[in-house]
């Protein structure tokens, strides 16, 4: 199979992970505002809210835990890009009259591990 046991390309795996994350967030009572927000500073996978809190969410999906937890791959540079993108988004929201009570940064880790011929 191409690119590991899932048969998915890296991009397809990422989209699948984000779809799983959105479903999970909605089940937890979050309202999804934006998916794949992009600006000059970078990208944010999901922007969602719940209980007057705005969440900027990075989704990391891996085929296995062989290289550690998915969230461990988020570098300092990536965190900086997410923060700068969030600042840009918040400025746009403020211009439209929306100011959240709290802002949080979340990571959703998804591992899709397929063990063929396990027994």
Image (cartoon, rainbow, N blue to C red):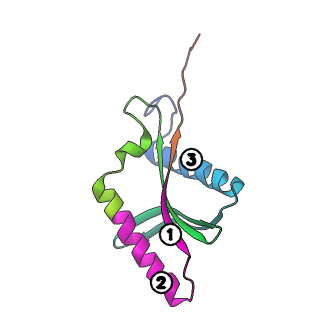
Furthest toward the top, the residue is 119
Residue 91 is inside the magenta segment: yes
- Asked which quadrant contains residue 79, the reply is bottom left
Q: Which residue is mark 2?
A: 92
Between disc 2 and disc 1, the foreground one is: 1
* Residue for point 44% across, 83% down: 91
Query: In this rendering, which labeled residue sits more in front, label 1 or label 3?
Result: 1
Query: How many residues crowd around disc 2 within 10 Å: few (fewer than 14), some, or many (20 or more)?
Result: few
Between label 2 and label 3, give the one nearer the viewer: 2
> Which residue in the rendered view is the most extreme toward the left?
77
Q: CA distance from mark 2 to mark 1?
A: 15 Å
Instruction: For label 1, count other residues whose C-alpha is less than 10 Å away and answer few (under 14), some (14-19) or many (20+).
Output: some
Of marks 2 and 1, which one's residue comes earlier in the chain? 2
Looking at the image, which is closer to me, 115 or 74? 74
Pick whichever of labels 2 and 3 is earlier in the sequence.
Answer: 3
**Residue 71 placement (x, y as % from top left):** 42, 45
| Secondary structure found at label 3 | helix
Residue 92 pos. (x, y %): 47, 83
| Of callouts 1 and 3, the N-terminal one | 3
Magenta-colored span = 81-106
Q: Identify the residue shown where x is 35% and y is 71%.
A: 84
Q: CA distance from mark 2 to mark 3?
A: 29 Å
Q: Is residue 53 left or right of residue 81?
A: right
Identify residue for label 3: 16
104 relative to 16, above or below = below
């Amino acid at each position: 199979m191409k690119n590991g046991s899932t048969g998915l390309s890296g991009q397809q795996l990422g989209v699948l992970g984000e779809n799983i994350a959105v479903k999970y967030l909605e089940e937890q009572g979050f309202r999804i505002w934006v998916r794949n927000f992009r600006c000059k500073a970078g990208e944010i996978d999901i922007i969602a809210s719940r209980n007057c809190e705005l969440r900027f969410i990075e989704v990391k999906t891996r085929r296995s835990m062989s290289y550690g937890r998915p969230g461990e791959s988020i570098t300092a540079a990536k965190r900086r890009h997410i923060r700068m993108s969030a600042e840009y988004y918040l400025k746009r929201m403020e211009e439209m009259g929306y100011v959240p009570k709290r802002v949080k940064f979340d990571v959703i880790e998804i591992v899709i591990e397929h063990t063929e011929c396990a027994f």
